[in-house]
Amino acid sequence: MNQRRNRTRFTEDQLKILIKAFDQNPYPGYATKQRLALEVNTDESRVQIWFQNRRARHQSQKKSEHDEDLESSQDQDHAEEEIQSREDRRHRSSYTPSQLHTLIQAFTNNPYPGINTREQLAKEIGVPESRVQIWFQNRRSRFHVQRKREPHDQD
């Protein structure tokens, strides 16, 4: 049975720290997310998700307020911040042939593994579970794109 990770619930103190950081820069780099993770005592991947969710909520609120003029000038600011934060992004993960073999075999068995399976795979191949989760997301995306490109059987 596929299980999801338990929802991360932040305390008020943790939220104050995260919101303050978000107000300063909604697109923090990897080093900043690592520092925040240490500060609020959680994984960097959880901080990354919190920022993604916060940006999505922030954008939908702006759209509902019809502040399109203000939004376009802020989009310009965020584009500049994004370029700057690319410099301190997480390094691209690379996998050994043995790790890839294990991941591909697991994907063939189940392209939607639950948290327990992902944690087991992570331990087996020696990478964080968050990297395994991203690998499966990317693999599913490539798989769907490939299937769309294949010609459909004409009977």
Image (spheres, rainbow, N blue to C red):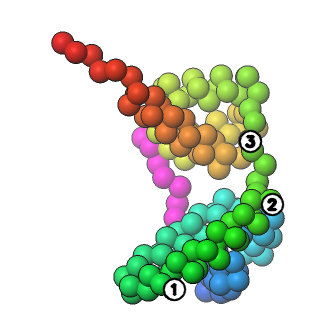
Residue to which mark 1 is pinned: 70
Q: Give me the C-alpha separation between circle 2 and circle 3.
A: 15 Å
Q: Give me the C-alpha separation between circle 3 and circle 1.
A: 37 Å
Give the residue type that dot 1 points to. Answer: Leu
**Secondary structure mostly taken by the magenta-highlighted segment of the chain:** loop
Residue depicted at 18% across the width and 12% down the height: 155
Contact (Cβ within 8 Å) of mark 3 with mark 1 = no
Above or below residue 77? Residue 45 is above
Contact (Cβ within 8 Å) of mark 1 with mark 2 = no
Residue 19: which disc? Answer: none
**Disc 1 element:** helix
Q: Image quadrant for the N terminus?
A: top left
Residue 104 image offset from top left, x and y in percent: 58, 26
- Residue 12 lies in the magenta-colored region: no
Residue 62 image offset from top left, x and y in percent: 45, 82
Q: Earlier in the sequence, mark 1 or mark 2?
A: 1
Q: Quadrant of residue 25?
A: bottom right
Residue depicted at 69% across the width and 70% down the height: 80
Residue depicted at 57% across the width and 74% down the height: 75
Above or below residue 52? Residue 64 is below
Residue 138 image offset from top left, x and y in percent: 56, 40
Nearer the observer, disc 2 or disc 3?
A: 2
Furthest residue to the left?
155
Q: Judge the density around disc 2: few (<14), some (14-19), many (≥20) Cα neighbours within 10 Å.
A: few
User: Which stretch did the figure color magenta?
Assistant: 1-8
Relative placement, left or right, of 101 versus 110 is right
Residue to which mark 3 is pinned: 93
Residue to which mark 2 is pinned: 88
Tell me, yes or no, if residue 45 can be seen here.
yes
Give the residue type that dot 3 points to. Answer: Ser
